[in-house]
Image (cartoon, rainbow, N blue to C red):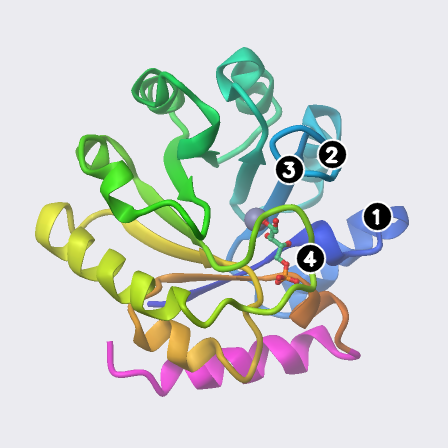
Amino acid sequence: MKKIAPSILSADFARLGSEIAAVETAGADLIHVDVMDGRFVPNLTIGPPIIRSVRKTTKLPLDVHLMIERPERSLDQYIDAGSDIITVHAEASIHLHRVVQAIRESGCKAGVSLNPSTPLSALDCIIDDIDLLLVMTVNPGFGGQAFIDAMLPKIARAREFIDRRRPSVVLEVDGGVNVDNIAAIAGAGADVLVAGSAVFHSDDYGKTINLMRRRLDSMPR
Ligand code: DX5
Ligand code: ZN
C-alpha cells in the first residue's frame, strides 16, 4: 500500500499544530519533518524542540529527514524528541554505518537518503542495515522546486536494487511530487511519496490527498 507523507516544510509554521491536524484528518499516512542546518543545505528549519511538540499533536508516525552535517553529533536529541523514522544523508556522514546502527538500536527505523547526484552504489554496502531508502528528486534545501525528471529512472533502479537485495526496505521519494506526477513516480516503484507544497499550498488538503490517493490506487503494484 502506497503512502502519502505531507512535508510540514510548506505548512504555516505559526499554525503548525492545526496544519498537522488538518493533514491528519485529510488522510496523511506519515508526517514528514525536514530538518535543515544551514550547512549541509543552504536553509535552516526546525530542530528537536519543535519535533517534541509536534509529537504531542499527532498519532501519525514522524518521518524525520535530517539534512544536517555529521548527524551523529545530535542524533540522540532527534531520537528523544519522538521520531519514528530517522533518515540521514549518505553524503553527510563519514561513518554512515555507525549512525544507522545507532538509529536502529534506539528503536527507530533507519533511513538513508541520496542527493540527486549520488549514485545508488553508495548504498551497496549498507542496504542490509537500513529500513528505508529516500531518493531525493530535487536538490535538498527548499520546498516548491520542480521534480528532476532524470530521477525517474533512478527510482526504478532503486526499486530493482531493493527487490534484489533487501525487499523489506521502503522506497521513499521526496521533492517536487504533485498530483500530476505522483502516478508516474509510484509506477517507477516508490512506496512513500513525500509532498510538501502540493499539499500545503493547495486550497483543500483533503481533496488534494484524496486525488493523490486515487492516482496511487490506479497503479498496478
Ligand atoms: C526538500 C525537502 C522536501 C520538501 C519537499 O529539501 O526534503 O521534503 O519539503 O517539498 P515539495 O514537495 O514542495 O518539493
Ligand atoms: Zn524531506
| Amino acid found under the numbered disc labelled 4 | Gly
Q: Is mark 4 within 8 Å of ligand 1?
A: yes
**Residue on which the image places disc 1:** 13
Tell which tag, 1 or 4, sits nearer the viewer. Answer: 4
**Residue on which the image places disc 4:** 143
| Residue at x-position 14% and y-position 56% | 163
Cα distance, mark 3 to mark 2?
A: 13 Å
For the stretch drawn in magenta, the main secondary structure is: helix
Mark 2, Cα crowd under 10 Å, few <14 / some 14-19 / many 20+, is: some
Tell which tag, 3 or 2, sits nearer the viewer. Answer: 3
Point out which mark residue 46 bears: 2
Closest to the observer, 59 or 186: 186
At mark 2, the secondary structure is loop
Verify whether residue 217 appears in magenta: yes
Question: Does 122 sit above or below residue 31?
Answer: above
Location of the C terminus by quadrant is: bottom left
Q: Earlier in the sequence, mark 3 or mark 2?
A: 3
**Residue on which the image places disc 3:** 41
Q: Earlier in the sequence, mark 1 or mark 4?
A: 1
- Residue at the left extreme, as displayed: 164
Mark 3, Cα crowd under 10 Å, few <14 / some 14-19 / many 20+, is: some
Q: Earlier in the sequence, mark 3 or mark 4?
A: 3
Tell which tag, 3 or 4, sits nearer the viewer. Answer: 3
Q: Which residues are magenta?
A: 203-221
At mark 1, the secondary structure is helix
Tell which tag, 2 or 4, sits nearer the viewer. Answer: 4
Cα distance, mark 3 to mark 4?
A: 12 Å
| Residue at x-position 46% and y-position 46% | 115
